[in-house]
Image: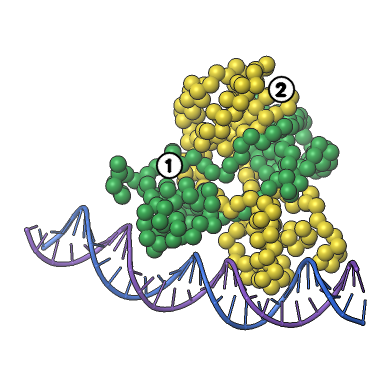
Chain colours: A green, B yellow, C blue, D purple
Amino acid sequence: MDRLDRKILRLLQEDSTLAVADLAKKVGLSTTPCWRRIQKMEEDGVIRKRVALLDPVKINTKVTVFVSIRTNAHSTEWLKRFSEVIVEFPEVVEFYRMSGEVDYLLRVVVPDIAAYDAFYKRMIARIEIRDVSSAFAMEQIKYTTELPLDYMVVDNQKSGEE
Amino acid sequence: MDRLDRKILRLLQEDSTLAVADLAKKVGLSTTPCWRRIQKMEEDGVIRKRVALLDPVKINTKVTVFVSIRTNAHSTEWLKRFSEVIVEFPEVVEFYRMSGEVDYLLRVVVPDIAAYDAFYKRMIARIEIRDVSSAFAMEQIKYTTELPLDYMVVDNQKSGEE
DNA sequence: TATATGAGGGAATTAAATTTCTTAGGGGAA
DNA sequence: TTCCCCTAAGAAATTTAATTCCCTCATATA
């Protein structure tokens, strides 16, 4: 991957509806080679998928809650089942295994506090959890699906390094 | 918005490359009305944008760090500048103002611990922050951009409620 | 009962993606 | 050095999908 691929990725991360011809113009290529680069990056899995992003307010899921879970000393079996159960909830949009104090961290989206409470009850009904603590986000100041491309390993042999 | 719109959204949240004709077939419409519904939801801002999602590993940003910031008693000016500075960093992919103990929460993506340290130094060089604590994610068990559509307010008059 | 309104659908049209065929440049082997 | 191969680019043709146009039907309303 080179500088041109990075440019293409930068644009597609922002807006994947761009026509290949327009994209090509912006990166300084003609449509065919540009199209082929995109194909290649899709085959290689660099581009995972293309999705529509919805407005959380319009869809009635404006509240984000971060759920910290502490679970000292549990069986492997429990951990497996725990993950499986949690992943199933569509309200859980992110789920991490952490180092440090907290063992797991969830990002949960719901319409309001009441809905969070309902979700919480459904969750603990499905699996026993020791220590849970919930932190509510008052405001989402930034949310982007664009990953920084500055760390990408590029081939500087190619396409006239500056 | 009705049940059909919800179906359309469900599919487009998963894969926005679906041809309108295929989408239409799946939801039980012909292409024209299906196309018009999509247009309408784009105009209304229900569909915010369409983007390409990249593979964090291939792009060399596999490490997620959650950064908790406590900042008791600061001027409005400081808060404004703080937000502006933080938002600029491409490594900060999510940024919330929180209730409770922690005042702000960031999700930062970087290649490795060393890069996080470099990021951290750049951040505190740009703005003075009292109390920062970093928690590393060992594993991303779930990450999705699909919002739950179960809370959506739908018009049950329309299209034969069951 | 006439009539506007909103939604659906078929077919034509336009635009974009994809394929095919050619060309140019660079690097290594004879 | 010259020739050949490999890789990437580009123009044009073709295929496929998006978009528009025009018509029909059902519902609700005066």
Write the residue at 57% across / 44% down.
A145
Cα distance between the residues tagged 1 and 2: 36 Å
Please determine whether, in this image, residue B22 is positioned above or below residue A50: below
Circle on res. A152: 1
Write the residue at 44% across / 51% down.
A8
Whether residue B120 sits left or right of residue B4 in the image: it is left
- The chain to which mark 1 is attached is A
**Residue placed under numbered mark 2 in the picture:** B101
Using the rendered view, name the quadrant where residue A32 is placed.
bottom left
Write the residue at 83% across / 64% down.
B158
Residue B17, x across and y down, in percent: 57, 61
Q: Is residue B120 visible?
A: no
Quarter holding the C terminus of chain A is top left
Q: How many marks?
A: 2
- Crowding near pointer 1: few (<14 within 10 Å), some, many (20+)? some
Element on which disc 1 rests: loop
* Amino acid under disc 1: Met
